[in-house]
Image: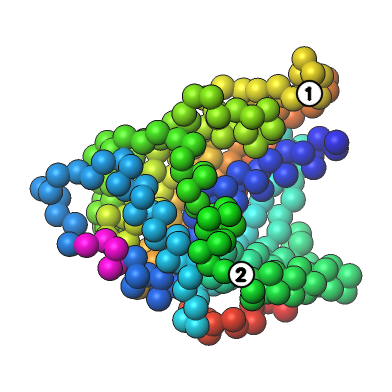
Amino acid sequence: MNRQVFVVSLVSWLLMTVVSPASDSQAMQQAATLAGPRADALAPLPSGDQVIRRMLDRYAARAAATNAPVWAYDKRMVTEKLDGDDKVEQRTEKQYRVQIIKGVPLSKLVKVEGRDLTDAELKKENQHEAGFQKQLSGRDPKKAVKEGEALINKDLVDRFQYKTLRREAVFGRPTVVVSFWAKPGKDDGSVQGRVLSRLAGTLWVDEATADVARLEVHLTQGFSMGVLGILGSVKECGMELVSRPMTDGTWLPDKTTLLVSARMFLSSIRFRMEETSSNFTLEPPNGIIAGN
């Protein structure tokens, strides 16, 4: 496998697994109902499992939300290949327009290295969007959550143990800070299983809406691939996500950074990725994404 393709694929999978885009205003209202009484700084802290259970309910409500305005935003993604001294060897910049549809983010590429897409690239993006819309149109929300199509699902959260640490304000909103680490015996030998069985980190969860306000996650140890590590190994992987609350209390990704250090065959490689978001807007349900 091409080394850069593998690392970028790993980065993309990690982002899709642990980054939690926000939903539409209807799901926001449903989550507020789930939240119960207003957060009180003097109230007893909920357990880590209670916080995660509410977060899971939040995403189930998001997957079921229909016919309501949705949030959209611009995303700038810069990926850098680094040498041993962390100097940039190769840099790629892409711009996307992201729309949250039924709780799932659709990222549509609009620029590469500052230029507009070619006809072939635009055709590919339109086909991707059409396939995405077709897939979601017949999706049963309950089945989607059960089978793991939602970004946050029971199979994922059951892989970890949780502990509540404290309350902390993020952008002026009260959050519950929860640490998490992988349960033992969850490594099935696949790359995905090896990553998940070695993840640990901290979540800042909005106490009123159960949205993720902030996330820090890292590998507790590296792992090899192939027999005796002949294909290579992942030495280090760490990610930080900071979200920002919108006018209705919905949290959307503000900045995401990720660093991956790996060995592919005999060569060591390091990749750094940074995503920044801007131009947050509410759009009609099933609206056309700007940037065509």
Q: Earlier in the sequence, mark 2 or mark 1?
A: 2
Residue at horizontal 27%, vertical 55%? Answer: 207
Of all residues, the one furthest to the right in this rendering is: 120
Q: Which of 68 and 235 is in front in this view?
A: 68
Residue 130 placement: quadrant = bottom right
Q: Is residue 20 left or right of residue 74?
A: left
| Residue 211 visible here | no
Provide residue 183's location: percent of width, then percent of height. 46, 29
Q: Identify the residue position indicated by label 1 in the image.
A: 226
Residue at image coords 57%, 47%: 17
Q: What residue type is labelled 1?
A: Gly
- What main secondary structure does the magenta stretch of the protein show? helix
Evaluate whether residue 155 shows in this view: yes
Location of the C terminus by quadrant is bottom right
Q: Is mark 1 on a helix, strand or loop?
A: loop
Which residue type does callout 2 highlight?
Arg
Label 1, residues with CA under 10 Å away: few <14, some 14-19, many ≥20: few
Report, in whole angstroms, how far the alpha carbon at label 2 lies from the one at label 1: 36 Å
Give 239 or 101, whichever is nearer the viewer. 101
Q: Which residue carries the number 2 mark?
A: 139
Q: Give the range drawn in magenta.
A: 32-36
**Residue 231 picture location, percent across and down:** 81, 24
Residue at (50% x, 83% y) in the render? 67
